[in-house]
């Protein structure tokens, strides 16, 4: 058998984790963890629902996720593609995680807890950018917080200098391919830069 199916199977291969791996996990945001949140311009929001799991990139000016208390975080739901997959999941299953990244720093901060969606007008207005407020704010009640070892970022050389950009298809080209030409990908790519400028927030 080469498939691991139990925790005992896992421990046979991986052994036990180090003391440092356990000691860093707390149920609130320490001053050091708060500093990481304050300086982060990018986070990955993960949720779970009846259809499965979802991971959504979230970004804004550094500190866009607000620390309401050491046990509560507020994330504005900025304008996006309006699929609202993450929000649909949260209203059905509040389990949620934020993973914060800071450019140039090889560590990431992981925060797990339970989320709710708040549409209080004053709260949403407090996150206004360029005259535009988010339609809702995700409030995460912190249950676990810990930083992730830097090896993954270091192996990826994520913050290293990129000498040559990979030749990837554009969003329009991908949608044109998926729809076998039914979607006008060329027009989508042509209009995207201007559309992005006027719909950032």
Image (cartoon, helix red, strand yellow):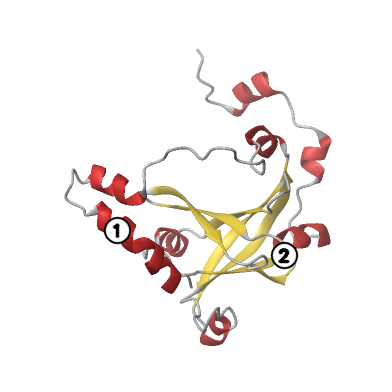
| Contact? badges 2 and 1 (CB < 8 Å) | no
Instruction: Give the number of the mark in front: 2 or 1.
Output: 1
Label 1: state its secondary structure.
helix
In the rendered image, which residue does mark 2 sit on?
38
Asked where in the image residue 122 lies, by quadrant, the reply is bottom right
Tell me the residue that label 1 is attached to. 188
User: Whole-percent x and y of residue 6?
Assistant: 56, 26
Name which residue lies at 78% across and 61% down: 35
Q: Nearer the viewer, residue 144 or 153?
A: 153
Looking at the picture, does residue 60 appear above or below residue 53? below
Q: Position of residue 133 (x, y in %)?
A: 50, 80
Residue drawn at point x = 75 percent, y = 67 percent: 70
- Label ID, residue 147: none
Question: Residue 8's spot in the image, x, y percent?
Answer: 63, 24
Quadrant of the image occupied by residue 113: bottom right
Say whether residue 150 is left or right of residue 5. Answer: right
SS of the residue at dot 2? helix
The structure residue drawn at horizontal position 25% and vertical position 42%, both measured from the top left corner, is: 177
| Direction from residue 17 to residue 197 in the image, left or right | left
Residue at x-position 43% and y-position 38%:
167
Query: Is residue 109 visible in this depiction of the protein?
Result: yes
| Total residue callouts | 2
Left or right: residue 187 compared with residue 4? left
Quarter holding residue 38: bottom right
Q: Nearer the viewer, residue 139 or 105?
A: 105
Q: Is residue 199 visible?
A: no
Rounded to the nearest whole Å, what is the CA distance between mark 2 and mark 1?
35 Å
The residue lying toward the viewer, choosing from 88 and 61, is 61
């Amino acid at each position: 058998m080469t498939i691991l199916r139990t925790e005992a199977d896992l421990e046979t291969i991986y052994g036990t984790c180090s003391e440092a791996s356990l000691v860093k996990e707390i149920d609130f945001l320490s001053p050091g963890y708060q500093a990481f949140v304050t300086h982060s311009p990018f986070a990955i929001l993960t949720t779970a629902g009846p259809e499965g799991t979802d991971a959504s990139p979230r970004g804004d000016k550094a500190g866009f996720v607000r620390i309401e208390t050491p046990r509560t975080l507020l994330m504005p739901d900025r304008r996006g593609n309006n699929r609202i997959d993450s929000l649909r999941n949260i209203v059905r299953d509040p389990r949620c995680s934020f993973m914060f990244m800071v450019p140039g720093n090889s560590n990431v901060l992981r925060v797990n807890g339970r989320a709710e969606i708040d549409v209080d007008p004053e709260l949403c207005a407090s996150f206004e950018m360029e005259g535009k407020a988010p339609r809702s704010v995700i409030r995460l009640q912190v249950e676990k917080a810990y930083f992730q070892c830097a090896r993954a970022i270091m192996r990826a050389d994520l913050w290293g200098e990129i000498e040559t950009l990979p030749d990837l298809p554009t969003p329009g080209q991908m949608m044109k391919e998926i729809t076998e030409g039914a979607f006008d990908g060329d027009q989508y790519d042509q209009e995207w830069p201007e559309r992005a400028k006027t719909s950032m927030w």
